[in-house]
Amino acid sequence: MSYVNPKIQTQFESLSIELKDEILKRNVRLENLHDLIHVLEQIVNEDTHS
């Protein structure tokens, strides 16, 4: 189950619903902005290599 630290909840909530759903289904732990950026980069890289 994914976790979003309340400290970055505002940044997380600013994303589209589709993007938030994609992040949450990955079962990641987002403790800080770096973690969020890392997951977003993974999604972009997967999308560009499809």
Image (cartoon, rainbow, N blue to C red):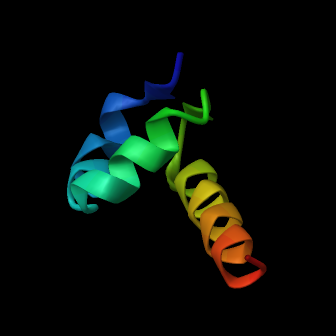
Image position of 9 (left or right of 2): left
Q: Residue drawn 28% across and 41% down? A: 9
Give the image location of residue 34, x and y in percent: 61, 57
Give the image location of residue 46, x and y in percent: 72, 69
Q: Residue drawn 41% across and 30% down? A: 5
Q: Is residue 26 above or below residue 22?
A: above
**As drawn, which residue projects farthest toward the bottom?**
48
- Name the image quarter holding the C terminus: bottom right
Q: Residue drawn 78% across and 80% down? A: 49
Q: Residue drawn 21% across and 60% down? A: 14
**As drawn, which residue projects farthest toward the top?**
1
Q: Quadrant of residue 45?
A: bottom right
Q: Nearer the viewer, residue 35 or 47?
A: 47
Q: Is residue 46 above or below residue 19?
A: below
Give the image location of residue 6, x and y in percent: 31, 31
Q: Quadrant of residue 42?
A: bottom right
Image position of 19 (left or right of 25): left
**As drawn, which residue projects farthest toward the right?**
49
Give the image location of residue 26, x and y in percent: 60, 36
